[in-house]
Image (cartoon, rainbow, N blue to C red):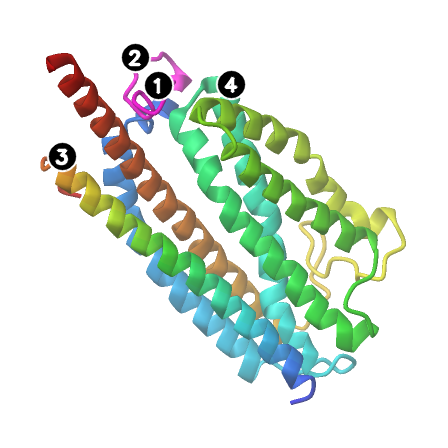
């Protein structure tokens, strides 16, 4: 598949479950649907993030040990969640790209990469800003910190690899393999605080147990995480929309150039 | 508020990164829409 055929609707209709998946490979349908969904992600995302961060910054109580530095948590924890969730989405898109050759999955992976790298950079930077007053160091080679740094390099590798080829499909294929292999880092990040003796604290919120955090801190944290997640999805969707239109433009220009060359 | 410098730096960084990606995506979408509309006037998205 080259740029001229990228994102063209399937000629042969796929059967069964593939039909549902490939419905969204039609660029026109994707643009219509995403155009309707985007405002419902972007505006609530912005408002909820502002409420969550404002609550966390001005209304939530300071920690009895950490003081006001704990307010960095309202950015650090959601960005850490988005770093991992973004990479999981990247790996899922890569799987769809490799297994089902879904053209929008290629593009989604291409566009999620930089946003996920931004979330990971924010997580590392805010962690460092939190660590300095609490631990007395900007950085320690702790298992949690190191595994998140590896995640950041995986994102950078994916960005570089997908953009390193003239042929978009080859770049997408190489990036997809890296994304799937790199997904092994996600459980390492999650369980690093349990498997190793780390300076980083263990998780305060788990799926199985009650949160070990004061409810007055939990609510703004939940709102920040929800708002930032909506914002993250909105940004990825907007970038994917732009990518679809850019590739469509390129394909039309190529077709026009070929037509003119044939006529001459 | 203690550790104010660190808190301001963290929130400032968030605002910068979020604005960079949001405004970038919004502008890129508008540019792509205009270019597509120019080359293919049937596209009214």
Q: Circles 4 and 3: CB distance less than 8 Å?
A: no
Disc number placed over residue A13 in the picture, else none: 2
The disc placed on residue A128 is none
Q: Residue at x 43, y 66 (%)?
A: A48
Q: Is residue A50 magenta?
A: no
Measure how far apart labels 4 and 1 are at the Cα level: 14 Å
- Please give the label number shown on residue A99: 4
Viewer-side residue, A221 vs A189: A189
**Which disc, if any, is residue B40?**
3
Can residue A16 be seen at all in this image of the molecule? yes
Q: Circles 2 and 1: CB distance less than 8 Å?
A: yes
Could you tell me which quadrant the C terminus of chain A lies in? top left
Residue drawn 45% across the image and 73% down it: A51
Label 4 vs 1, first from the N-terminus: 1
**How far apart, in angstroms, are the residues tagged by discs 3 and 2?**
26 Å
Circle 3: element type: loop
Estimate the x, y position of residue A20 in percent, counting from the top left: 36, 23
Q: Secondary structure at mark 2?
A: loop
Numbered disc 3: what chain?
Answer: B
Label 1 marks a residue whose chain is A
Of the image marks 4 and 2, the number of the one nearer the N terminus: 2
Res A153 quadrant in image: top right
Indicate the secondary structure of the residue bearing disc 4: helix
- Distance from disc 1 to disc 3, alpha carbons, whole Å, reads 28 Å
**What residue occupies the far right of the structure in this picture?**
A197
Q: Which residues are magenta?
A: A1-19
In the figure, residue A103 lies in which quadrant?
top left
Residue indicated by mark 1: A19
Residue A260 location, x and y as percent?
A: 14, 20
In front of the other: A53 or B18: B18
Main secondary structure found in the magenta portion: loop
Instruction: Examine the rendered structure and indicate whether residue A105 appears above or below residue A83.
Output: above
């Amino acid at each position: 598949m080259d740029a001229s055929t990228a994102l063209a609707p399937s000629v042969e209709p796929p059967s069964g479950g593939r039909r549902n998946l490939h419905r969204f490979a039609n660029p026109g349908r994707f643009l219509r649907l995403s155009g309707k969904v985007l405002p419902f992600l972007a505006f609530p995302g912005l408002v909820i993030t502002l409420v969550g961060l404002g609550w966390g910054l001005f209304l939530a109580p300071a920690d009895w040990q950490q003081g006001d530095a704990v307010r960095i948590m309202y950015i650090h924890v959601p960005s850490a969640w988005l770093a991992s969730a973004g990479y999981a989405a990247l790996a899922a898109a890569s799987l769809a790209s490799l297994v089902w050759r879904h053209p929008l999955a290629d593009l989604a992976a291409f566009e999620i990469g930089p946003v996920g790298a931004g979330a990971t950079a924010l997580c590392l930077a805010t962690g460092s800003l939190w660590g300095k007053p609490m631990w007395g160091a900007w950085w320690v080679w702790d298992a949690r910190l190191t595994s998140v740094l590896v995640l950041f390099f995986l994102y950078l590798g994916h960005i570089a690899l997908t953009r390193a080829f003239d042929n978009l499909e080859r770049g997408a294929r190489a990036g997809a393999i890296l994304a799937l292999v790199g997904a092994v880092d996600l459980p390492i990040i999650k369980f690093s605080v349990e498997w190793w003796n780390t300076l980083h604290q263990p998780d305060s919120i788990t799926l199985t147990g009650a949160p070990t955090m004061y409810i007055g801190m939990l609510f703004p944290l939940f709102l920040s995480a929800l708002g930032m997640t909506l914002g993250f999805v909105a940004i990825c969707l907007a970038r994917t929309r732009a990518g679809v239109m850019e590739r469509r433009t390129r394909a039309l220009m190529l077709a026009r150039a070929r037509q003119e060359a044939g006529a001459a | 508020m203690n550790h104010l410098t660190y808190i301001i730096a963290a929130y400032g960084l968030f605002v910068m990164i979020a604005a960079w990606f949001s405004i970038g995506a919004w502008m890129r979408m508008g540019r792509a829409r205009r270019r597509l509309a120019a080359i293919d006037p049937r596209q009214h998205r």
